[in-house]
Amino acid sequence: MRLLRQFLVTSLCATLSWALHESDVGVVDWHKKLIGVPLYHSLQTAPVFYQDIVYTATGNNVLAALNATDGSIVWRSIFEPEDPISAFGVHSNTIVSLSGPGGATLREFDLFKGHLLLEKRLHDPLLGHLWEPSNLGTSIISTGASSSSDSSSSTILALTNGDTLTSINSSTGETHWEWTSPDKGTLIIYSKAITTPTTAYVIGFAKSASSFTLHVTSLSMLDGEVIASVNIPANFKNGLTDYIAITSGSDTISSIAWLDQGSIKAASLKPNLKGQVFAIKGMQYKRIMDVGLSHDGQFIAIKEDGAAQVLLLDPQTSSLKVIWEFTDSAPSKLYSDSHYVGGLNKDGEPRIARVYWSNVHNRVVHQVFSAQLAEGKGSVSGFTFPFETSVHGIVAHVAFDVAGSDESTGTRFLLTSSTGSVQLWQQDLLSWAREESLATIKVAEIVEMPQEKMTEEHVRLEEEGFFERVTRQFSDAKNLPQYAVNFARRFATGSHAPISISQDEESVSRDAFGFRQVIVAATSHGKIFGIDSSNGEILWSRVLGLGWAAEVGGTVIPVKLYVTRTVSDGDAPQVTLVTQRRADNTLVDTVIFHLDVLTGDDVRAESKSPSGAILEGFDIISGPLIEAFMLPTQNKTIMLLDEFLQVRIYPDTPEAEAEFQALAPSLHFSLRTGGPGQRKIMGHQTIYSPDLSMYYMAYPTWTIPFPPEEDVKAIIPSSPGLLASFGHVLGNRTTLYKYLNPHLTAVLTSSLSNSPPTCSIYLLDGVSGSIVYHSSIPAASGVCDVKATLAENWLVYHYFDDELAGSGQSKGHRIVSVELYEGNDIDEKIKSSDITSYSNKSAEVTAYERSFVLPYGLAALTTTTTKFGITTKDLIVASRKNNIQSIPRRLLNSRRPRNKPTNEEMEEMLVQYDPLLPDDARLIVSHNYEVANVNRIVTAPSLLESTSLVFVHGLDLFFTRTAPSNTFDVLSENFNKVQLVLTIVGLATAIIVTRPMMRRKRLRERWYR
């Protein structure tokens, strides 16, 4: 019987799913593979060149390799969120990484293919120190041949947790020796390690009364025995940046340099740690910088006036000396702050590059310093390149490929901008660029494009003369051959002509079925994009301006994105982006950006802004935002609440103000109140009281009496969309009427202090605060990782169950489908969409519920959306297996019978309930694409009622279209149009041929009658 049920369910999947054929891949969908914005704040994670590949760790917790020639991804390794990358190093033919709290896990990858060669747990992640930054106390060093018998292997020295140095065989993972600081990081945090052939030095800092002091321990490379351990008198302010470990003379001489009250001091490191401290006299400095040449004895020192000098550790005299000072490197209104980066050329000679923006040339200047130490001098060469700061922000980091640069090809370097753009430049020519900030999308919406616009000459036909009309018609006739070709293709194959891509606003238009739309996406790096849904290409992009905060610095964080004008409104589509601007001086403001969807232009601007100009917003609240809503008004007004619950509306026009005043008495909404761990939910209304404020204010109307330990985690509103059916007709011709309360809201809570910890999901009436549905579920490992979506009367939520409730139960991923119907019985109708929330009948709800077991976890889920809501809603899920699936609604039907279906149930096409949902590859709509770390799924209708558009964003971007009830409103591709036409032509020919014969036959019959 169970096999029969599995067969029926599988057959149902095959019948209902709109499977993606191999021929459709890249036609109805596209996939953009990303790695994320590089972590450039530390040399241990910043991009580095090795041969023709760029290696980097990124903010999306990815270790990746990029082809330096074309920017394609050679390979990438995605780490788990709880296992953040803290350091990596390129060694010979492998790349080694440390990840997790305190560098708990060491991994070794193949340099060119990314295959995992070695994975070793160095300590329990629960025992890792959670320092800020996360890479503090971690470091990786690769030395020559290990002490083992395998002379071909090398030794990896891993500094972890700020107190442990481990020597590991890179081939076998065997630990040679391990040293742990006696105080285990309580007083001294070791953050750097350097080696000579015989000795390893671990260098750390300890906090004194008003500053930091240095501590150095020397260890034997053979067995890890402590040789010496000393404190070095020092007085510096920043334990992260104010000291540098330096080696020189083929790694035989080691030293340490630090910034001590404005002067730079250094000390040579010998195994017994006995030596003298020396300093550069007569100069005052405010900062020192490791530019990646510490192994060659060179680093950058910034003087008090801001000028940059190159300092060298002289291996002969064990002293520091200035070998160069960059001209015009002091702060000036003519130049931006400089970026310094070093590297070795093909001959192993060190080079230092300086990159900065010049307001004089409106270009970026690139200078390269070369030291001729034998002659006691140096030289600087340079060039400028046309970096578009209004399009990509400012230069945030530069990686210098000295070995891959020569006189014939020019200097090659990788640039990372403040907006997340990763670019490779060959001298002053841009080779390629990657918009990696798309891996950090915060909000996104799909917006319909308008129809192709008619030109002014076509609209005003009555103003044309004879010759003008003839000229126009001849001009139009040039498109006739292409039209004929497209018509023949469409007629024979059913496929439409490919969409022409253009940046011109006049030619940005939808296709015949509305599959081509604009995806508007705002990222956490202060940039907003308009993406063509037909192919994933960027139509336009704008940098979100900081306004007054540009003088002090800051970030713009997208919060909400609303579509405020659509094609049906008779105007160009528009969106409004609500953001919070966090200035570096700690001030927070709420800023609104109002954009034209087709061009990215500022709608508020009086004149059209130049292409690529920085988009300046409108400061609507001088303070943080509590919540924002779009009101159900004709002008699609946005209501915002400040920290004092004062109401601001946008646009602030008399029409919008009048609409809000008319709506205010009936306006109800829910807000989370309280601090982290103590959040509650309260219902609110608005009132105008001139004595309290010049604005409308929100006041509480109800609250849910949750237990003190229960914390509100999220509020999930019902998905918008049109409704085509108010009930469900059963097989016996009775009706279940859907519970369609327009104020229904889902609320997720957690009670982690309970024993055992639990999570809860509620369905609340936003007007009265009454609980319509409630379910309590286990909190796996003390974490409430619940995903939920609400559409019409259908609630679906997913969680992981790690409890064994009974003998027949097992741990696993659960997905629960809940459907709400009116009344307490069949055919009972309470008109839930119209009834007041304070009526006693509003609580008369029947919930049908079924729980299913999934063989995999889910990262996100939502339902499909169609133009009129006639098509069955399917559930779109992003699985932890990095694919996107469309689960048919009938598989999740909460009324699936537990026993064999009756004739009436079979008439409803119900199949017998089976708790296990099949892992059917035919449900996958992402083909063989790897869609990793999904954050959200956005759905939108097309012009075809049968088809829903699906956009998925996370680490990667993916777009496709699905037809939950099959494409019933268009002919399928298998429909034989040619045969139909030939049949009609044959019948017409037969009629033409036989008509004279029949006429003569009837004439003869009349003669001989």
Image (cartoon, helix red, strand yellow):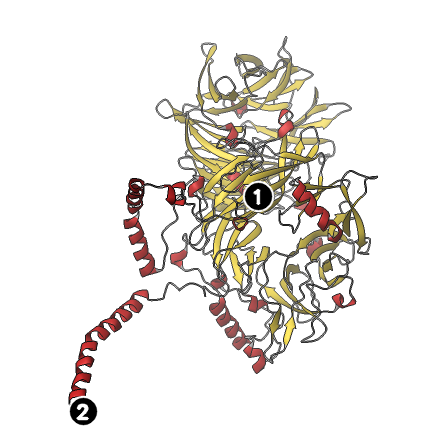
Indicate left or right for 802 with 470 as reference.
right
Indicate left or right for 193 with 623 as reference.
left
Q: Position of residue 517 (x, y in %)?
A: 48, 49
Disc 1 to disc 2, how far (Cα)? 82 Å
Residue placed under numbered mark 1 in the picture: 575
Q: In which quadrant is the N terminus drawn?
A: bottom right
Query: Tag 2's secondary structure?
Result: loop
Compare residues 968 and 890 and report the one nearer the observer: 968
Query: Tag 1's secondary structure?
Result: strand
Residue placed under numbered mark 2 in the picture: 1009
User: Farthest bottom residue?
Assistant: 1009
Label 2 packing within 10 angstroms: few (<14), some (14-19), many (20+): few
Circle 2: residue type: Arg
Q: Position of residue 335 (x, y in %)?
A: 54, 18
Q: Is residue 901 visible?
A: no
Q: Is residue 228 visible?
A: yes
Q: Which residue is depicted at the point 72% across and 73% down?
A: 824
